[in-house]
């Protein structure tokens, strides 16, 4: 477990793979706590603030859809 987003650096969550494809796994909320939508927003904001979208041509998201709020 990585802890709070404030404790992370981009290098902690982004791995570079085949043909320099950048991959990020943000995980999901603790079961029964929180809301998945909030985690998605936090993840995207973190990536934007830390320059993850600089010098790339394409972004694809695989967003979890089976977690509900509450």
Image (spheres, helix red, strand yellow):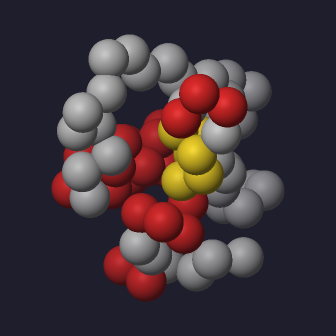
Q: Position of residue 27 (x, y in %)?
A: 67, 51
Residue 18 quadrant? top right
Residue 41 quadrant? top left
Determine the residue positioned at 33% across, 56% down. 46
Determine the residue positioned at 58% across, 80% down. 3
Determine the residue positioned at 56% across, 60% down. 13
**Please, is residue 26 above or below residue 67 in the view?**
below
Q: Position of residue 26 (x, y in %)?
A: 59, 51
Q: Position of residue 14 (x, y in %)?
A: 54, 53
Image quadrant occupied by the N terminus: bottom right
- Left or right of residue 48, residue 13 in this image: right
**Please, is residue 49 above or below residue 65 in the view?**
below
Q: Position of residue 29 (x, y in %)?
A: 65, 55
Look at the image and tell me whether residue 29 can be seen: yes
**Viewer-proximal residue, 21 or 60?**
21
Q: How many marks?
A: 0
């Amino acid at each position: 477990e990585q802890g709070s987003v404030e404790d992370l650096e981009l290098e902690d969550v982004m791995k570079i793979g085949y043909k320099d494809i950048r991959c990020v796994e943000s995980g999901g909320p603790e079961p029964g706590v929180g809301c998945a939508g909030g985690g998605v927003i936090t993840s995207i904001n973190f990536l934007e603030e830390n320059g993850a979208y600089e010098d790339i041509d394409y972004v694809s998201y695989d967003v979890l859809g089976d977690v509900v709020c509450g």
